[in-house]
Image (cartoon, rainbow, N blue to C red):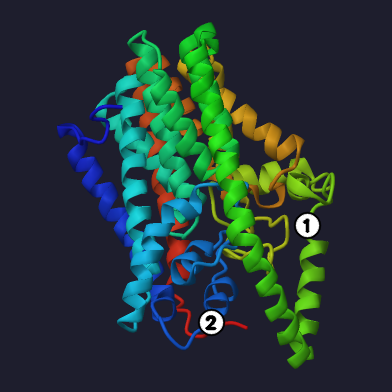
Amino acid sequence: MKNIFKIKKEERIPGLVALLVFVLLNGLFFYKYGNLFLRAHHVSFWQLFAKTFHVSGFDAWSYIFMSNGKLYFEIPRHPLFAVILYPFYLINKELISSGDTNYAMIFMAILLIASAFYSFIFVYRIFREIIELKKKDCILFSAMLYSFGMVMVSMLVPDHFCWSLLMLTMTLYLAGMAMKERRQLSAWTIGILSFLTGGVTLSNIAKIYLAAWFVNGRKVFAPKNLVAMILPAILLVTTAYLIYTEVREPQFHVDKQIEIKAHAKDPEQQRKDSIHHAWVLAHTGEPMKQEGFWKWTDTSTSRTDALIHNMMGESIQLHDSYLLDDMCVNRPTIVKYNYAFNYVIEAIISLLFIIGIVVGIRHKFFLLVLSWLGLDIVIHFVMGFGLNEVYIMACHWIFIIPIAIAYLMKSLTPGRQVVLRYFCWLLTLYFWVWNGYWLFTYMSDQATQIMK
């Protein structure tokens, strides 16, 4: 992985433009929430972040942890989230004690912008060095990826998805270059990628295993490679167990006692909480089981509706109805577009994607990306994990769409490439205008009151 973070000469201008875009997106987020979230004193961080922040289904647990050290995110699913943020919690703790500003929002913005920037660089390199497109087409398809609604939103919300996009695109770049140069991924590379990628989102460790298998073939089962895959998994599970039992579980019992006392003092709030809990249950799919990982599965939500309106809908084009609303607050599981042209656009991008799959399937690198999509389909559509808000998971898979269309572009004659290029630019500009407008509309409405 030597020198992969060094910016190459031809990447500087596209990278700078992308960086400015990511800074502006985070600036919008600061405009909406900065007046509240930068407060350090006389606030309940739970009320401030968990009750006030509701963007789609994204969480603000990172803000709470960096503010007071309390863990609310699902540790088994994100074993290293707290470990990565812990130094920032320590720094923020000292800064809060000596001033009136909470720097959690600022620290997270820096991490998001850096992650978004390097994910853009790796995406650009995938098009340039692995698929070997012209520079103008690399810019086109990179811009297309970040024009998608949920990718755009993921670049500014304080959740883990932007980090996952970085790790996954970096893995694809490293795996693709290894394929191109007919060399293997080293055990060290496999181990580091497994540990970091799985640490951000545990299920994505399987994608590292697939990458290692596609690149190394049967040699992936060599002892050193097996150790490189199994050891990180053991370390992650152990880390998650220790954090949960030593930190999260004691905090949970304390929080539960606080909640009981609060409800005893305010029966009306208890009634509201009960009504809200019942609403959430009514809008959540029926799980396979009620315990462990199974509680996040879904057997009742329509797969067809979820595919049309959520996975290929909200992920790409934001809905103007229930704009960026949270399913755990007031958003229905399925939201439909108000305009027919949104479905026309969805059909067009889906058709280009399908044709791209047909063309790209002959390439080993594309088969790797397709296998990742297959894994996500099993997780979301077969098991139903997170199906009711599958759109917020877009950063885990949606890069396959511009990659597929890029392979279609490369297969065409120069004359037909021109037609597809202009058409894709029109689509990309449309996505930037549509999603940018609705994101700006949402973020320009300042949050001025802490919710209860």
Query: Where residue 139 appears, x then y in whole percent?
Result: 30, 36
Quadrant where the C terminus lies?
bottom right
Q: What residue would you read off at disc 2?
A: 44
The residue located at (53%, 73%) in the rendering is: 49
Q: Image quarter for residue 201?
A: top right
Q: Image quarter for residue 110?
A: bottom left
Query: Where residue 125 appears, x then y in whole percent?
Result: 31, 29
The residue located at (39%, 25%) in the rendering is: 189
Q: CA distance from mark 2 to mark 1?
A: 28 Å
Q: Which mark is residue 433?
A: none
Quadrant where the N terminus lies?
top left
The residue located at (63%, 64%) in the rendering is: 326
Q: Amino acid at mark 2?
A: Ser
Nearer mark to the viewer, of 2 and 1: 2
Whether 257 is drawn above or below 318: the answer is below
Q: Earlier in the sequence, mark 2 or mark 1?
A: 2
Query: Where residue 150 appears, x then y in whole percent?
Result: 51, 51
Q: What residue would you read off at disc 1?
A: 284
Q: Amino acid at mark 1?
A: Thr
In the shown orientation, is residue 272 left or right of residue 318?
right
Taking the image as drawn, is residue 434 in sight? no
Whether 401 is drawn above or below 451: the answer is above
Q: Nearer the viewer, residue 418 or 131?
A: 131
Q: Nearer the viewer, residue 234 or 180?
A: 234
